[in-house]
Image: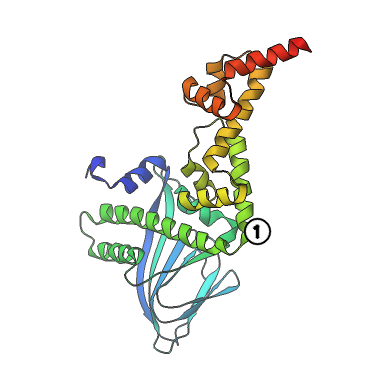
Amino acid sequence: MSETTLPRAWEGLINKGAFLPVIVRTVERIHDPSWSMEINRHDHFEMVYMKRGNAVFQISGQDVNIGSNDIVIIKPHQPHKFSVKSQAGCEFIVLRFKFRNQYDDEYSDVSLNDFIEFVKNKESGSFITLKVSKKNDIVYVMNRILRERERQELWGDLLSYLLIMELFVLISRALKMEWEENIKGKSLKLKELMQIAKEYMEANYEKDLTLTDIAKYIFLSQSYFAHAFKEEFDISPKSYLLKVRVEKSKELLEKTDLKVSDVALSVGFSSQQRYNDIFKKYVGMTPLKYRKKLKKEKMNR
């Protein structure tokens, strides 16, 4: 299968990340209430989807109730075990995975930015949980991975690899949605995130930043971030970034002899024309006229 036939989401992840997900093991089990489990600790992630029944996971000393259509993802090196609570027993799928560097075959606990940046965040602790439905795409892909690995066909490894790439795209989206729902009721947390985004723009204004880049930095969708930022600061994030760039350029026009075209590039504008237009919109005159005005004022003083 050539790269050109890969779905865009997979192709983007393959080209973008040095570390890519690798399945360590897949398991499908049914246990009754009499079953017991010793404490486990792995050097990989463990994702458990409860198809039927109820159980209590104990993860790093914390009890986590898991019911039908719940997913729990346990981070590496976390001590955990679980006990069956429903009388009829429980049925579940376990998917264990880690991340391998595609360039030197070394393994890592971290990769795939969208997913891992959230998983590493202290907000999620030693595990994260997701509530899904039976017809959810995540569940469908997990079942596909399980079936393909059981068949052990010639193309099975490649298909499993592509499926797990798709799985991580779906998990990332689901985590983002859940994260947004979670912070909607936490005004202080949302204010903190907007301030972080604001400071991020102020520290990286000279880079080729997009709205997506900034939203991604605080793990929010682009639309939700734009709305929350405007509500918090009464200015859109795009306008705020342009305003920061213009203010920084005013300092360069005053304190340096850089050409206007170089000033434009130094503060993140792609062209002098674009810079001139934006500068005039915010300041009321072109950068060149602004510089001449400053020089004239200085001479008069």
Looking at the picture, the colour scheme in use is rainbow
**Image location (x, y in percent) of residue 166:** 34, 55
Position of the C terminus by quadrant:
top right
Image-based side of 138 in relation to 86, left or right:
left
Q: Residue at x 53, y 64 (%)?
A: 127
* For residue 203, above or below residue 188: above
On the image, the x and y values in percent for residue 247 come to 63, 29
Residue 251's place in the image compared with 133, above or below, is: above
Q: Is residue 62 above or below residue 260?
A: below
Where on the picture, by quarter, is residue 32? bottom left
Q: Which residue is mark 1?
A: 188
Give the side of residue 268 with respect to residue 173, left or right.
Answer: right
Residue reaching furthest bottom?
87
In this picture, is 111 found above or below 40?
above
Query: Is residue 258 or residue 273 the one in the foreground?
Result: 273
* x, y percent for residue 29: 36, 76
Residue at x 26%, y 46% (from the top left corner): 6
Could you tell me which secondary element the residue under label 1 belongs to? helix
Q: Measured from the top left, where is residue 241 in percent x and y?
A: 56, 36
Q: Measuring 75% from the left and 9% from the top, which residue is drawn there?
A: 299
Quadrant including the N terminus: top left
**In the image shown, does 124 or 294 lie closer to the viewer?**
294
Q: Residues within 10 Å of mark 1 (few under 14, many from 20)?
A: few
Name of the residue lying farthest toward the top: 299
Task: Identify which amino acid the numbered label 1 is placed on.
Answer: Leu
Report if residue 109 is visible in the image: no
Viewer-nearest residue: 153 or 276: 276
